[in-house]
């Protein structure tokens, strides 16, 4: 997806399913797309406190209490980074398959599945 859609790493890693339109109608009409409105970024805990979580959708749990940084899902730095990117049909079909695999994993793992979705 990074290559097919010219996405930066933070944009790609910040995608959530609510940003993806891979409906049958969208694919058939050539309008399958993703909306870039979030990015994953590592920030210092001090900076996060100063920002008072402004423009932050989610703060991921730190794996180690001694770290000075955390991963956050946040709005992009500039308004121009918010955009819609149209998907080639092959990429849309790959996302459909990936979503099915993820749904299967959620069902199989039940309460043990860690779902870090925004919201």
Image: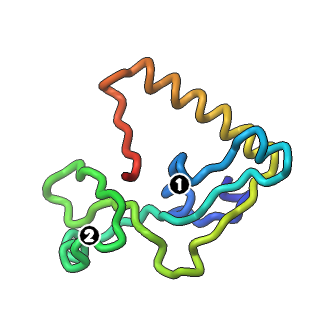
Crowd rating for badge 2 (residues with CA inside 10 Å; few <14, some 14–19, many 20+):
some
Question: On the image, numbered disc 1 is attached to which residue?
Answer: 15
- Left or right placement of residue 55 versus residue 61 in this view: right
Q: Residue furthest right?
A: 29
Tag 2 secondary structure: loop
The colouring scheme, among rainbow, by chain, secondary structure or one colour, is rainbow
On screen, 30 above or below 108? below
Which is nearer the eye, 83 or 46? 83
Can you give x and y, in whole percent of width and height, for residue 60 in the image? 30, 53
On screen, 21 above or below 109? below
At x 31%, y 26%, the residue is 112
- Left or right placement of residue 42 versus residue 27 in this view: left
Question: On the image, numbered disc 2 is attached to which residue?
Answer: 53
Which is nearer the eye, 30 or 104? 30
Can you give x and y, in whole percent of width and height, for residue 49 in the image? 18, 73
Disc marking residue 86: none
Q: Residue furthest top?
A: 108
At x 40%, y 47%, the residue is 117
Can you give x and y, in whole percent of width and height, for residue 58 in the image? 33, 57
Dots 2 and 1: beta carbons under 8 Å? no
Which is nearer the eye, 65 or 32? 32
Q: CA distance from mark 2 to mark 1?
A: 19 Å
Tag 1 secondary structure: loop
Q: Residue furthest left?
A: 66
At x 75%, y 59%, the residue is 86
Crowd rating for badge 1 (residues with CA inside 10 Å; few <14, some 14–19, many 20+):
many
Q: Earlier in the sequence, mark 2 or mark 1?
A: 1
At x 65%, y 56%, the residue is 34
Can you give x and y, in whole percent of width and height, for residue 115 in the image? 38, 39
Image-quadrant location for residue 48: bottom left
């Amino acid at each position: 997806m990074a290559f097919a859609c010219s996405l930066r790493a933070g944009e790609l890693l910040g995608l959530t399913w609510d940003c993806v339109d891979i409906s049958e109608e969208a694919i058939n009409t050539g309008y399958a797309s993703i909306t870039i409105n979030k990015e994953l970024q590592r920030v210092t805990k001090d900076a996060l406190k100063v920002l008072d979580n402004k423009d932050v959708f989610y703060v991921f749990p730190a794996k180690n209490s001694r770290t000075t940084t955390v991963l956050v899902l946040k709005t992009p730095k500039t308004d121009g980074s918010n955009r819609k990117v149209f998907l080639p049909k092959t990429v849309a079909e790959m996302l459909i398959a990936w979503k099915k695999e993820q749904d299967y994993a959620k069902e199989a793992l039940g309460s043990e599945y860690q779902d870090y979705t925004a919201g």
